[in-house]
Amino acid sequence: MRLHSALTILSLLVIGFYAPSLQAQAKQYFTIKGKVGNKTTDSESLPYANIMAMDNKDELLFDGVTSDDNGEYSLTLPKGEYTIICSYVGFDEASQKISLDRDLNINWFLSVIDLSTIGVSVEVKRNSIAHCGCLGVYHLNESFTDNMLTPSGEKDILKTIQLLPGVSPTAEANADYYVRGGAADQNLILLDEIPVYKPTHLLSFLGVFNSEIIADASLMKGNAPAQFGGRLASVLSLEMKQGNEKKTTVSGGLGLLSSKISLSTPIQKDKSSLMIAARRSNTDFLLKPIPKFKDYKLFFYDLNLKATYELNARNMLFFSAYTGADFVSFAQQMETKGGNMAANLRWRSIIKSKFFTNTSLIFSRYEQNTKLINNNEIFTLNTALGDYTLKSELRYFANYKSNWRFGVNSTYRRIQSIRSIDSNKTDKLSLENVAYVSNEYNINKNWSTMAGLRLSAYSIEDKTYLNLEPRLAISYQFNEKLGAKIAYSRNVQHLHRLSNYNLINPTEQWVGNSYHIKPEISDQVSAGFYRVFRNGFQLSAEVYHKNMQNQIEYKNGADINTAPDLESELLFGKGRAYGAEFYLKKQWGKFRGWISYSLARSEQQTLGVNNNNWYASRQDRRHDISVVAIYHLNTKWAVSGVFEYYTGSPIYYQRGQNDYKMPNHHRLDLGATYKSNRKKYNRENKRFQDSWEFVLYNAYGSQNVYDIAGNVSRPTTVSLFRWLPSVSYNFSF
C-alpha cells in the first residue's frame, strides 16, 4: 500500500508538472538538431555538451539540453529570434544567432581551450549549476582527468573517481571502490552500454579501461535516471571515442607498468570510421630478471574496438567491442586467470526531427579460474557469467521544456561455477525484463524536474521477482550562480557478488536471485546546493540518507569456497547509510584542482548477528578527504599533487563484532608532466605531440596497511609500497 500511494503521488506530480506543456502545443514550434564535435580531431563527438537558448533580450530561456552519448542533440523552440550557445568543459564556447521559422540542422565543432591561460566565461559558469536535474552526478571528460596522478603513472578513470566526494577505494592502491556506504558489487559499470563485471587488473591494482579510448564518463551516485538500473550504489557510464572520419591518427604510450597504442581512421571518408586500441602490461618483463620474483607471474592485456557506419542521413550503426584478460601466479601457491569479453551492435535512427530511437544487441561475459595450493592440496574454482541483452529506447523531444525517454530491454543470463573440492557444478539460467519511462521538464527559468519509473522483472525457474522503481528530482535555480536540488530514488539489484574478502588470495563468484536470495532494494533521499563564483571556483554540498533491504551477510566461519550449499552460508538483513559531502573545485586557469570531504556512516542489522543490534558495515568510512592540485608553470610544464586521508574500515573476526579497525590511511603523491613543442611535425607534415609524465607515489613513505591476516590474537599486517616512482612517455600524431 505504501508503494502504491507513493506511485499515485508521483503520477499526480508528473501530471501537474507536465500539463502546461500540453497547452503549449498550440504554439508554432520548430526543431534545431545536430551534432557536437571536437574541431581538433575533426569528427570525434562530444557527449553531454550543453546547448542553451537565449531570447532577443539576452535572457536565458532555460537550463538547456545536453547532447547524447554520440554528441547528437535536439532542441525544440517556439518560432522566434534566438542566440544558440554551445559549450563543453575544456573547450571554447560557440554561439550563433538564428531566426527560427523552420526546422534547422546546426552542427558545432568546438576548439580545445588552453587551460593554462584562459579564465572562466559567464556562460560556462551559469550552465554548470543547472547542467543536470540529478544529484550526485559528475561528468568527467579528458580535460577533467588531464595531469591526474595514479600509482601506475598513467590515467585511470577508476582511480580518479575515488577522489570525488562519497567515493572511496576498497583498499590501498585498489581500483575497486565504495560509493556512499555501498558494497563494491553495488556499482554498475558500463562501457558503451555494456556491463563490465570485472573492471580491474592485477588483483584490482589497475582499472581495465584504457585512457586512450575514453571520450566521456558519467558517475551517478544512486540518483540515476530511469534508463539505468540493476545496482544500489552507483552507475559509472563510460563512452568510447569514435574513429576519425577525416584522417588517420595514432596515439600511444610507454610506461613501467604497461604500454598502449590506438589507431583512429576513416573506413570510408565522411561516412564510416574505426577506432582500435591495445594495451599490454610490462610487469612480466620487469619481474623476470629479479631472482626473488622468478616464480611470480603478473600479466594482463586489453583490446578495444569501435566502428561507425552512416547508412544515410537518418540512420547510423555503431559496433563496440572489448576483451581483456589477467594471469596472476604467486610462487605456485595461487594462480588466477580470466577476464571479460563484451560487444554491442547499436542502430540509431532519427524517425523525425523530434524522435530518436536506439536499438542495441549486447553481449557480455566474465570468466575467472582460480587455483589455490595449500600443503600440497589443490583447490580450484571456475566461475563464469554471461549476458545477452536486447534493448530499445525511444527519445521524444517534445519542445524546449520537455523531453521523454521510453525503453524496454530483456536480458538472458547464465551463471556457472565448478569446484574441484567436491566436483560441485552449478548452472543457473535467468531472464530479466525491464521497462521504463522518464521525463525532463523545465517548468520555467527557475524550476526543473526529472521524473521516471522503472519496472524490473527477474525470473528464475518458476519464480519471478517484480519491482517498481520510482525516481524524482526537483531543481531550483535561484540565479545564474546559485541552485538547489532534492531527489528520491529507488533501486533494485538482482545480481550479487560473493567474496572471501582476502585481498591477497581472492576468490569471488556471482549469484542471482533465488528462492532464498531476494533482490536487494534501496531507497535514497538526497538534497544539495551548488554555488559558482566569478573567479572560477565551484562549491557544492550534499546530504543523503539511504535505507537498504535484503543485504547479504555471512555466517561466522563461513567459507563460500568449500561449503556444500553456498546459500546456507548466507544471512540477510537490512542496511542504512547516511552522510554529508562537500566539493570545492577550480577547473580553469593555471591553477586547478579540488578538495572533497565526506562524513558518512554505513551500518547493517542482521538477525542473529551482534545480538540483533546495528553494527558498522565493512565499507563504513567515517571521514574521507581528497585534495587535488594541478599547476601549469607554462605551456610545457605542469606539476601536480594528490593527498588522500580516510579512516580505517571495520575488521571482522566475528560477524558484527567489529571493535577492530584498519589503521587510518594517508598518502601524498607528486607528479610532473612535460609536453613538447606543439608545433613539431613529422615527415608527412602531420602534427606530432608527445609528453613525459613523472610520478612519485607515496612521497613521504607512509606505511599504509593493505590487508590484515591471521586472527584477533595474532594479526599480521601487509603493506604495499613505501615509495613507488614511475615514468611514462605518451605520443600522438
Image (cartoon, rainbow, N blue to C red):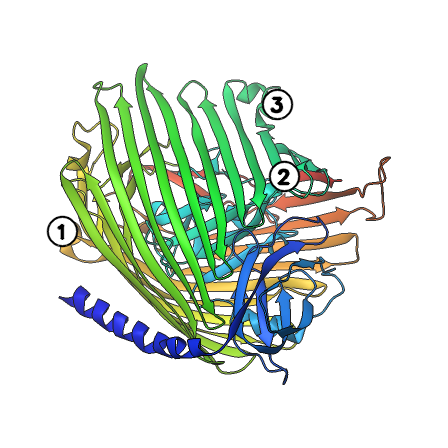
What percent of the width, then of the height, locates residue 285? 61, 23
Q: Residue furthest bottom?
A: 57
Q: Is residue 524 left or right of residue 675?
A: left
Task: Give the residue drawn at x 35%, y 56%.
Answer: 181
The residue that mark 1 highlights is: 607
Q: Quadrant location of the N terminus? A: bottom left
Residue 622 visible in the shown view? yes
| Cα–Cα gap, marks 2 and 1 | 57 Å
Q: Is residue 439 left or right of residue 285?
A: left
Question: Cβ–Cβ below 8 Å for labels 2 and 3?
Answer: no
Residue placed most toward the observer, 730 or 92: 92
| Cα–Cα gap, marks 1 and 3 | 51 Å
Secondary structure of the residue carrying numbered label 1: loop
Q: Is residue 244 left or right of residue 349?
A: right
The residue that mark 3 highlights is: 285
Task: Give the residue drawn at x 35%, y 35%.
Answer: 387
Which amino acid, mark 2? Ser
Task: Give the residue drawn at x 36%, y 41%.
Answer: 390
Q: In front: mark 2 or mark 3?
A: 2
What percent of the width, then of the height, locates residue 370? 36, 24
Crowding at mark 3 (Cα within 10 Å: few <14, some 14-19, many 20+): some
Say whether disc 2 or disc 3 marks the residue closer to the N-terminus: 2
Which amino acid, mark 1? Leu
Say whether disc 1 or disc 3 marks the residue closer to the N-terminus: 3
What percent of the width, then of the height, locates residue 501? 33, 38
Task: Give the residue drawn at x 41%, y 39%.
Answer: 361
Question: Cβ–Cβ below 8 Å for labels 1 and 3?
Answer: no
Which corner quadrant of the image does residue 290 belong to?
top right
For residue 273, which numbered disc appears in the image?
A: 2
Residue 499 visible in the shown view? no
Which amino acid, mark 3? Phe
Residue placed most toward the observer, 23 or 429: 23
